């Protein structure tokens, strides 16, 4: 049975390149930080980053999401200048080597996003829905890029300090609806929704969101899921992050079955295999 919550020809205008989301796509995570929760320090040189981008594009990634500020709980503060240094030269080098690469900038700062878009990035992935930096909204208005709208309760430094909700799904939906209305008012049509796994949510909250992921279809906006190697997997299974790929794959398949259109992952090939198998199941006629 085909998904009906989006038109089959729904697409994101990525610097003039239309990415069709009838078949789900993969967004690859490229952290250029020394302290990201899983792969911090692995890609903090341009040469290393280029090798990862080359591999991920070959394996089928549609978007490379580059971030220079670790938003893990209790992560270290990073100056704006340092974040710029960790992202803009990388974007320029990546696009020089791979000019057709669809790059997304993972930042909550308006200035960083603006510089990234000027350098050739085509999307903003903002964990804060511009709550941490109102300059972000001005950047969105000016450049009119596709925008990943994520729910986060609190700030990265305190978001995991006993997050509480009266009605988890209703509160997240209400937050996203208000933000979508504002984006619509300034002409932003290409929006992806991210319920924000691990951002101001307990273990039980995360699994409740995944169980109820289909509720977000009511917003008629593509759903992005970012659960790759997160603590909801490692804490529940009592394993370390290096052994969390199988759990990531299991939850990604579940997310696809509930309508996810974008999988944001550290490991591209397993996610692509999830999508291929899910599509085979969905389109089987026997």
Image (cartoon, rainbow, N blue to C red):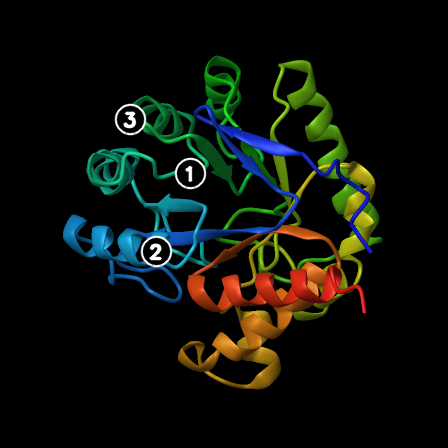
Q: Secondary structure at mark 2?
A: helix
Q: Is residue 206 visible?
A: no
Asked which quadrant contains residue 91, the reply is: top left
The residue that mark 3 highlights is 119
**Residue in view at x 25 percent, y 63 percent:** 42
Q: For marks 3 and 1, give the CA distance.
A: 11 Å
The residue that mark 1 highlights is 104
**Residue in view at x 22 percent, y 56 percent:** 51
Looking at the image, do the residues carrying marks 3 and 1 touch, with CB atoms under 8 Å apart? no
Q: Is residue 145 visible?
A: yes
Q: Is residue 222 left or right of residue 217?
A: left
Q: Position of residue 146 (x, y in %)?
A: 53, 29
Residue 177, placed above or below residue 244: above
Residue 276, placed above or below residue 250: above
Q: Position of residue 144 (x, y in %)?
A: 52, 19
**Residue in view at x 62 percent, y 55 percent:** 200
Q: Which mark is residue 58?
A: 2
Q: For marks 1 and 2, give the CA distance.
A: 18 Å
Q: Is residue 188 left or right of residue 210?
A: left
Q: Earlier in the sequence, mark 3 or mark 1?
A: 1
Residue 55, placed above or below residue 245: above
Q: Position of residue 208 (x, y in %)?
A: 76, 64
């Amino acid at each position: 049975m085909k998904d009906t919550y989006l038109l089959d020809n729904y697409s994101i205008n990525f610097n003039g390149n239309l990415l069709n989301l009838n078949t789900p796509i993969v967004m690859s995570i490229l952290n250029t930080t020394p302290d990201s929760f899983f792969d911090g320090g692995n890609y903090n040189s341009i040469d290393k980053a280029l090798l990862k981008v080359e591999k991920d594009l070959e394996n089928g990634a549609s978007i490379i999401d580059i971030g220079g500020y670790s938003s893990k709980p209790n992560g270290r503060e990073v100056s704006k200048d340092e974040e710029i240094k960790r992202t803009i030269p990388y974007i320029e080098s990546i696009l020089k080597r791979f000019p057709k690469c669809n790059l997304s900038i993972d930042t909550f700062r308006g200035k960083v996003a603006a510089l990234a878009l000027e350098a050739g990035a085509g999307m903003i992935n903002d964990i804060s829905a511009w709550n941490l930096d109102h300059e972000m909204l001005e950047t969105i208005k000016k450049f009119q890029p596709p925008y990943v709208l994520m729910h986060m309760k609190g700030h990265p430094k305190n978001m995991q300090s006993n997050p509480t909700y009266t009605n988890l799904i209703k509160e997240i939906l209400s937050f996203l609806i208000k933000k979508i209305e504002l984006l619509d008012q300034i002409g932003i049509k290409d929006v992806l929704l991210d319920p924000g796994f691990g951002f101001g949510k307990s273990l039980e909250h995360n699994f409740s969101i995944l169980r109820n992921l289909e509720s977000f279809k009511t917003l008629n906006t593509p759903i992005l899921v970012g659960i790759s190697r997160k603590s909801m997997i490692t804490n529940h299974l009592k394993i370390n992050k290096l052994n969390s790929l199988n759990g990531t794959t299991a939850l990604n398949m579940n997310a696809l079955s509930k309508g996810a259109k974008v999988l944001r992952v550290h490991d591209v090939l397993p996610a692509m295999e999830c999508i291929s198998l899910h599509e085979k199941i969905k389109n089987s006629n026997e």
